[in-house]
Amino acid sequence: MNRTTAPRLRTLLLLLLAVTGALLAGASPASAHAALTGSDPAQGVVAGTAPSQVSLTFSEKVAMGDDSVRVLDPQGKPVQTGSPVGVSGTTYAVKLKSGLAKGTYTVTYQVVSADSHPVAGAFTFSVGAPSKTVVTGTAPAAGGGAVGVLYAFGRYVSYAGFIVLAGGAAFVLACWQRGAGVRAVQRLVVGGWIALTAATLWLLLLRGSYTTSGAFADVFDLDLLGQVLQTKTGAALVSRLLLLAAAALFVAVLFGTYTRREDVTEKRDLTFGLAVGGVVVAAGLATSWAMAEHASTGLQPGLAMPVDVVHLLAVAAWLGGLTALLTALYRAPAEHPVEAAAVRRFSRLAFGSVLALVATGVYQSWRQLGSWSAFTETRYGQLLLAKIALVAVLVGIAGLSRRWTGRLTDLGADAQRARTDRVPAATASGGGGADGKAGDPGDARRAAQLARQRAAVDAARQKRLRDADENRFGLRRSVLAEAGVALVLLAVTTALTQTEPGRTEQEAKAAASSPAGSGTSAASGALTLDMPFDTGGTDGKGVVRVDLDPARVGGNTMHVYVQRPNGRAFDVPEVKVSFTLEAQKIGPLPVNPDHITTGHWSASGVQLPVAGNWKIAVTVRTSDIDQATVSKNAQIG
């Protein structure tokens, strides 16, 4: 990085950070990943009479199948009738059988959000009074298990294939046109095309099982495949396959016709045509991700999708070009080494890509997070912080590569001049045998063998000279380090695309902690307390919620819910509750609630003898030795 570029880059980065702060400070609520924001009956409520239906409200529209919503009685038998239907906006309902008995019912849901990700969960409500239930597996397996792991791996391979295909071709056309004839570079780009094509087909087959049963046996279910083809994600994957056919033609021309062109004008025209066609195909491939994932829904999708396309193209130009450069530095033949000028051209291309990544990344961060707190309080924010740190490391190593590039000597030109100088001598030595023996086949074979030996010696000499160049050796090491960091960065990026955005996660938590989300009612006098806990052990953080109804003197019904920081139900070995009225030295009055289902405990007939400001303490044990007690005061009576 030269002296004039560095200040400009620092100024630009400071400006972008300032813009990020302004955007995050003034962010308005929006969703980009479906989350349950309400239900009727609400979670944990005890209804006096059996409802005729169960309705669910999500943060955005979702895709539902016939079995997307199930309601199970205390014995685990389904009591819903028919398929769920849309009621209004983002609310969906399923009818229930008439004459439901008293007890605790479990509602499970499994839907696909508008950004293509499966969303599953469960909650309970009771009719008449809470009861034991045999339902233990409250969340369907969609999006998890072996199929979930294979689907995530397929996404990683598809991103890697796109980066190598698009970035490798861009490196050849924009930086090192002689590389079109280098076999190692050809294999790299073709390998990227094969990886992307295979991963796309694999994702298409896995998609049905990934969003429904989660069973590997359903991967080859043709009915499921037919349903997938009718979805937005299925259309995006099919579009990607069609574009890959065009990409195959592009690669064939690049490494075939293009390498055979000798005329300067024809080659220049073909270079321009390939560049235009390549940009169109690469942008189309990038759009196949943007049209079906986070960018396609939520806040400003009309702007978010083209920004996402630019972001993906910048990643491909930088990391894919870096991979091609690394291949050229290590695998290019001695007679066709990568020139210093080509490395400098790539350095400029990578610098422009980094600027594009920073600009588009700032917008994406604001759109997906919405607040500074989401960086540390949500999994998406934590992954994004890791990605930012990796990009910073990558930029630092790239700075070292630019320094080595500035010192790089071009051995290719020197070797070519040396070969040219040896041509007259070889011609003179060969002319001495023209006294009637020029047509001797034996002499021709010996001359050809001698030429091959000279070529081998020359190639070995040139390789020794190239490897002895300290600057070239330093460049190879720094580029290799960049590629290693890039592999980790790609894994984090893939995880980000499958993670619920911070905006939506915080909205879901807010909805769950609100009276509507917690199933309490001001009219009934019910009380809800949320208390974060940390037992200090592995997997020891979460939130415990206590619902007390009617929160008055006499008998009360208590429900206790334990959740992980991401809002999912959390089963722990033991939960104990006690009530203490310190002002009158009453208590602690212990209560040991019964375990109802995953993350849910209940107790009825909780007697509070007098009104006052009671301390409600909850002890949560997450292992044999790790436990914590948290408490809050609440007015009873």
Image (tube, grey):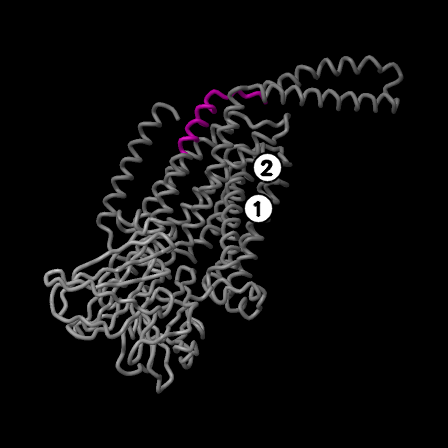
Q: Is residue 227 toward the left or the right of residue 580 in the image?
A: right
Q: Vertically, is 52 above or below 521?
A: below
Magenta segment, which residues? 395-412
Badge number at residue 637: none
Residue 331 forms part of the magenta stretch: no
Badge number at residue 185: 2
SS category of the residue bearing label 1:
helix
Depth order, front residue of 151/476: 151
Seen at 19% across and 67% down, the residue is 527
Depth order, front residue of 78/291: 78
SS category of the residue bearing label 2:
helix
Seen at 19% across and 73% down, the residue is 550
Q: Amino acid at mark 1?
A: Phe
Whichever of labels 1 and 2 marks the residue nearer the N terminus, that label is 2
Q: Vertically, is 117 above or below 361?
A: below
Q: Amino acid at mark 2?
A: Val
Q: Nearer the viewer, mark 1 or mark 2?
A: 2
Query: Which of the 4 quarters of the picture holds residue 124?
Result: bottom left
Seen at 59% across and 44% down, the residue is 191
Seen at 50% across and 67% down, the residue is 213
Q: Vertically, is 519 above or below 530?
A: below
